[in-house]
Amino acid sequence: MKAMIFAAGLGTRLYPLTSERPKALVEIAGKTLLERAIEKLKQYGVRDIIINIHAFGEQIIHFVEEHHRQWDINIRISDERTGLLDTGGGLLKTAGFWNPGEDFIVYNVDVISNIDLDKMLAFHKKHGALATLAVRKRKSSRYLLFDGNSQLQGWENTKTKEQILLSDKALHPFAFSGIHIIHPRFFSNVQKTGAFPIIPVYLELAKKERIAGFDHSDTIWADMGKMSELEQNIKMLDNANLL
């Protein structure tokens, strides 16, 4: 199985830790976020990974060159140093990397979780989804809205009161966890080019395709990309023996 690690973010929420290095190379308990993401994916049988880069991208290239032998997997770089493509554009740039007909994983580099990716993949296949998004019940300002069949039906921002609704059914709010499983047929359904976010694309595709939500609220999950929550999350992960 193949996977992509989103590592091109500017890491502004982790400043000053990211003043001289990319977010992917910030160390948590002696190990970089990139190492942790790679080890997580390898644990579930991933042997081919593509990593997108932007800010301090040369540091990630050097780090991978130094360490790839110890991981014993194939790693490629998707270079966005000349222009950040956001999540949608960044994924679209990798279209030629994937095997036809074979689902793949997309994983945010700043996520640490004990989510069972095998269980998520089984859910994805059972529902015949074009894309499955890992979601959970947690406090957030932005939520994806799903119906009783775990189909994406909307989005809302609780701060601005903005909403996108695809259904008048009762919908359930979940926060996105930065983990996707996608079928490569996704690329033939995307008409955009350049830099663009992926969530609006999912919302558009959900009008005609199965875009599912995999609820992993029973697992441990942390966003390590926020300086304001870093100390608290490190303590929580340490107590759960995830560090």
Image (cartoon, rainbow, N blue to C red):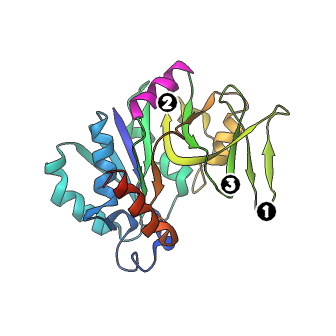
Q: Are the residues flagged by discs 3 and 2 in contact, CB closer than 8 Å? A: no
**Main secondary structure along the magenta-highlighted residues:** helix
User: As displayed, is residue 220 above or below residue 103?
Assistant: below
Residue positioned 49% across, 22% down in the render? 125
Residue beneath disc 2: 183
Q: Which mark is residue 142?
A: 3
Whether residue 118 appears in magenta in the rendering, the answer is yes
Residue bounds of the magenta highlight: 117-127
Residue beneath disc 1: 160
Q: Give the left or right position of residue 21, taking residue 233 as reference.
A: left
Which is nearer the eye, 101 or 180?
180
Residue positioned 31% across, 51% down in the render? 241
Q: Nearer the viewer, mark 1 or mark 2?
A: 1
Which is nearer the eye, 49 or 215?
215
Residue positioned 79% across, 36% down in the render? 166
Q: Secondary structure at mark 1?
A: loop
